[in-house]
Image (spheres, grey):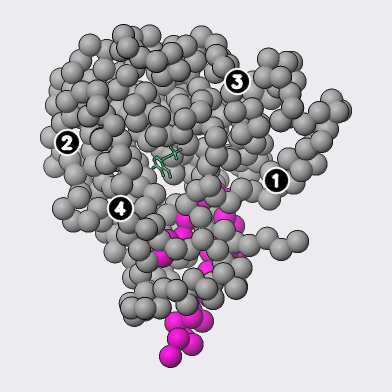
Amino acid sequence: MTRVYNFSAGPAILPEEVMEQARDEMLDWQGTGMSVMEMSHRGKQFMSIAKQAEADFRELLAIPDNYQVLFLQGGATSQFAMVPINLLQGNQKADYVCTGHWSKKAIAEGRRFCEINLAASSEENGFQHIPPHQEWHLDPGAAYVHYTPNETIAGVEFHWIPDTGEVPLVADMSSTLLSRPVDVSRFGVIYAGAQKNIGCAGLTVVIVRDDLIGQPLKSAPTMFDYQIHRDHNSMYNTPPTYAWYIAGLVFGWLKRKGGLTAIAEVNRAKADTLYRFIDNSDFYYNPVERASRSRMNIPFILSEQGLDGVFLQQAEKAGLTNLKGHRSVGGMRASIYNAMPQEGVEALVEFMKEFERTRT
Ligand code: PLP
């Protein structure tokens, strides 16, 4: 068996230890003679898996007691609607900050429910920086402020948490959650699709403050009401049991690694390795303002046109896969989530050096 270094933006690389544990337990989970996939979600075995996963997740992020953790389906994309449905609470407007592709999607969906105040945007400069807080125009009457702490496609990341006073702050943390410690008490809602740092596709994790639950729009579909999911411990209907179990294994792995402070250091070192190499090269280029660079998704451009195809082909041969940039921006992108080891980044840098040297 040959495993590759997978730089996909998501679904993404998972820790090998997690995959091995899942493989070992695949046919017989802890002497039950059943796979987790085959268990009733209401049975005591799955209930114990679910409970442990939530406890570990809460511990990793030090989630305060006045926040609920929901294990849902529908992806981060469903949260683009679920947030206004639950948080407008009679208000007609919300603030959004636009820093890239995913913010734009959230804004477009938000517009279906309320008036949107675009508090700040970096679209004019091609989403290559995070607009500084002093340039934001927040509406004190907004129901909430929504932003995207890490834009997976352009590779821009907030390295600070915006201060929105009493107005609840909502964050789409799909591509940054669990990559570093975060002060959950600063947020009203945090949500993330699981397919990057949490586990496999099919699960969406939502952290929501108690006071934001219970007043959804009257027309809200049952499955879009946070209260329904809270009251049924995320088991109102059949939850994505296997993805929930895998997430639990990932949380256990992260705890053994030393938690989020430890993984943040590893992530910083990996990102530094790649950015340092790119910045010292005349051949590769990263267009993002330095203070706004993502530690998870690193786009880069080859300075000579027409070489992208060969680069990708040769990278693939070298066991470095999924380096093609998003179709909307082109170029390359290396996503280096928690499960990507430092050696994977070093292998990429070595390959890039060699490609640059031999291209002529
Ligand atoms: N938000 C961000 C920041 C993302 O990176 C993605 C997917 O890559 C999404 C939202 C959409 O997530 P999903 O496919 O889980 O709906």
What are the residue bounds of the magenta stretch? 332-360
Which amino acid, by three-letter code, is at mark 3?
Thr
> How many neighbours does mark 4 have within 10 angstroms: few (below 14), some (14-19), or many (20 or more)?
some
Question: Alpha-carbon distance for marks 3 and 4?
Answer: 40 Å
Are the two marked residues, 2 and 4, in contact with CB atoms closer than 8 angstroms? no
In the image, what residue occupies the spot 25% across and 53% down? Answer: 127
Are the two marked residues, 4 and 1, in contact with CB atoms closer than 8 angstroms? no
> How many neighbours does mark 2 have within 10 angstroms: few (below 14), some (14-19), or many (20 or more)?
some
In the image, what residue occupies the spot 43% across and 13% down? Answer: 222
Residue indicated by mark 2: 118
The local secondary structure at tag 2 comes to strand
**Number of the front mark, 2 or 4:** 2
**Number of the front mark, 4 or 1:** 1
**Number of the front mark, 3 or 2:** 3
Query: Is residue 348 magenta-colored?
Result: yes
Which amino acid, by three-letter code, is at mark 2?
Leu
The local secondary structure at tag 1 comes to helix
The quadrant holding residue 1 is: bottom right
**Number of the front mark, 3 or 1:** 3
User: Reading the chain from its start, which is encountered first: label 3 or label 1?
Assistant: 1
User: Reading the chain from its start, which is encountered first: label 2 or label 1?
Assistant: 1
Residue indicated by mark 3: 238
Confirm or reject: label 3 Cβ below 8 Å from ligand 1: no
Residue indicated by mark 4: 292
Question: Alpha-carbon distance for marks 2 and 4?
Answer: 20 Å
Q: Where 128 sits versus 39, above or below?
A: below
Question: Alpha-carbon distance for marks 2 and 1?
Answer: 42 Å
User: Reading the chain from its start, which is encountered first: label 4 or label 1?
Assistant: 1
In the image, what residue occupies the spot 54% across and 32% down? Answer: 203
Q: Can residue 254 be spotted in the picture?
A: yes
Confirm or reject: label 4 Cβ below 8 Å from ligand 1: no
Residue indicated by mark 1: 19
